[in-house]
Image: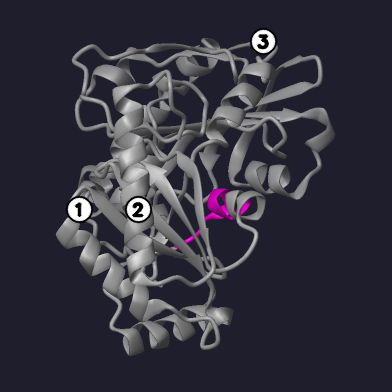
Amino acid sequence: MKKKLALLLAVMLLPLSAGCGKKELPPEEPKNEIQTAFRLEQCGLAYTVPDEWAKAENFNLIPASYAEADGEIYAKIRYNYAPDESMADLNNPDSTVPVEELMTPLVELLVVKEAHLESPEVQTELALFQAVEELPQQENFHFYCLSNYSGGISHFSEGAQKTFRELESHLPKFKNSIETFLPDESAVRAAAEEDSQYLNFISATLEGDAVSSTVFYDYDLTVVNFWASYCYPDINELETLEKFSQDLKKAHANVNFIQVIIDTPDENAEQTVAKAYEEAGVTFLSIMPDKNMAGWIIKHIEGLPTTIFVDKTGKPLSQQIQGIQSADYYMETTETVLKTLAQKHKNPQTLRA
């Protein structure tokens, strides 16, 4: 499977000023004022980014963060350095260069509950760095500052290596600014509960192109059909869905149709689906679920095929279609949902989607 980077990075690397949640947000307009002081209540961390990092040009520091109350890693904040020569590939949707060759971690802050200190995921994360410094503990939360990435920077150009070393020289100032305190775990759980109402994912299409739940933002409504390779050939309505998707484009430009193949990524499954798609002349978008979407599917999808409706914020509506249906039935149901949405926007206090 090809590895496409640009969209993946765009939705994955959220600004730290937005907090430590996992919910994806539409991209914000760039701000002129650079934030250097951060206090992340959900993570239990406060720190100040050195002025040398924030104000210097061409340093290309890319932050990423998340918090997960029940995860083996409770929270992680990482600053990655990407050389100038990597930016073209990072912004190129057709790039197949591995992400670890395009940027390297400069520093990472790790938060782990005591019960998970010896877990494989935590130990694997710690092993990625040669410098592991433990910060002040807060009750059952352990905090680490990680640097000196074991993968090194020998793959960077001489100029990029020099820039990276310059960034590293200011790490003592960064480390001295770090403050730990008891994380607001209830806020993390509340954010997770809110996120669970949305169909969030960062994944790839069947062709290997990066795709995420931002695919919902451009349409008032998205019809999402869930299917699996093991349904083929006995349970197969691909020709019907292709006709429906084409009719949908003509009748409602503000509505999109996509299909999720729940047993991918898997080489055999992908080959089966590719064959079935070729037979049916499929042109609609097909998505392979990531871990987040797989969890949502387990909780909300009882059988296959199932079709749902998702609004432009990525929130699934209550309406579902079970089993194989005709193209006319899909269109009629979609139009009913559109009318319900329109009425809801007109009288938001009287109707629920």
Left or right: residue 305 compared with residue 158: right
Q: Residue at x 81, y 15 (%)?
A: 139
Q: Is residue 138 above or below residue 131?
A: above
User: Does the CB distance between marks 1 and 2 fall below 8 Å?
Assistant: yes
Q: What number is the disc on residue 181?
A: 3
What predominant SS class does the magenta segment belong to?
helix
Residue 250, percent across and down?
15, 61
User: How many marks are shown on the rendered structure?
Assistant: 3
- Name which residue type carries label 1: His
Residue 239, percent across and down?
34, 80
User: Does the CB distance between marks 3 and 2 fall below 8 Å?
Assistant: no
Q: Is residue 66 above or below residue 306?
A: above
Q: What number is the disc on residue 112?
A: none
Classify 10 Å Cα crowding around label 1: few (below 14), some (14-19), many (20 and above). Answer: some
**Is any part of residue 3 visible from this angle?**
no
Mark-to-mark CA distance, 3 and 2: 49 Å
Identify the residue position indicated by label 1 in the image: 252
Name the mark nearer the viewer: 1 or 3: 1
**Is any part of residue 73 visible from this angle?**
yes
Is label 3 in a helix, a strand or a loop?
loop
In the image, the segment drawn in magenta is 288-295
> Who comes first in sequence, dot 1 or dot 3?
3
Q: Residue furthest right?
A: 115
Q: Residue at x 22, y 68 (%)?
A: 246
